[in-house]
Image: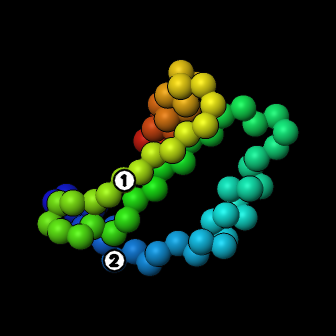
Amino acid sequence: MSNKIKSLIIEQPLHKENSIVNIAKNFTENTICYVLITCKKPKGAETMQVDLFFEGDKTLAAHLITSAQGVIDN
């Protein structure tokens, strides 16, 4: 397991109420697509459940994921 993943294991769970408020702030009547990626704390040495949900056009959702990767890398 990489050091980056090991350090994530000790992170505290998100505050669901705050997260929902933050997500809702970004939805407007002009929103046409969104992607939500979540993960749970690892249960084993290298097992982490990752879930992805999107609504809208598949091609646009893929573009959002690719664009987000660029933001994270910078």
Local packing at callout 1 (Cα closer than 10 Å; few below 14, some 14-19, many 20+) is few
The kind of residue tagged 1 is: Val
For image coordinates 46% across by 56% down, the residue present is 38
Which residue is at 55% across, 39% downward? 54
Residue sitting at the far right: 29
* Element type where label 2 sits in the image: loop
Kindly identify which numbered label has been placed on residue 2: none
Q: Tell me the distance, in whole angstroms, between the alpha carbons under discs 2 and 1.
A: 17 Å
Does residue 47 lie above or below 44 as drawn? above
User: Left or right: where does residue 46 sit relative to residue 13?
Assistant: left
Q: Nearer the viewer, residue 4 or 16?
A: 16
Check the image and report above or below for 67 versus 18.
Answer: above
Is residue 63 visible to the viewer in this orientation of the structure? no
Residue 40 in picture, x, y percent from top left: 37, 65
Residues at discs 2 and 1 in contact (Cβ within 8 Å): no
The picture places residue 46, in percent across and down from the top left corner, at 17, 60
Element type at mark 1: strand
Residue 54 in view in this figure: yes
Closer-to-camera residue (54/72):
54
Check disc 1 and report the residue beneath it: 50
Please state which amino acid type lies under the numbered disc 2.
Ile
The single residue placed furthest to the top in the displayed view is 59
Q: Which residue is mark 2?
A: 10
* Marks 2 and 1, the one that precedes in the sequence: 2
Residue at horizontal 60%, vertical 71%?
A: 16
Quarter where residue 18 is shown: bottom right
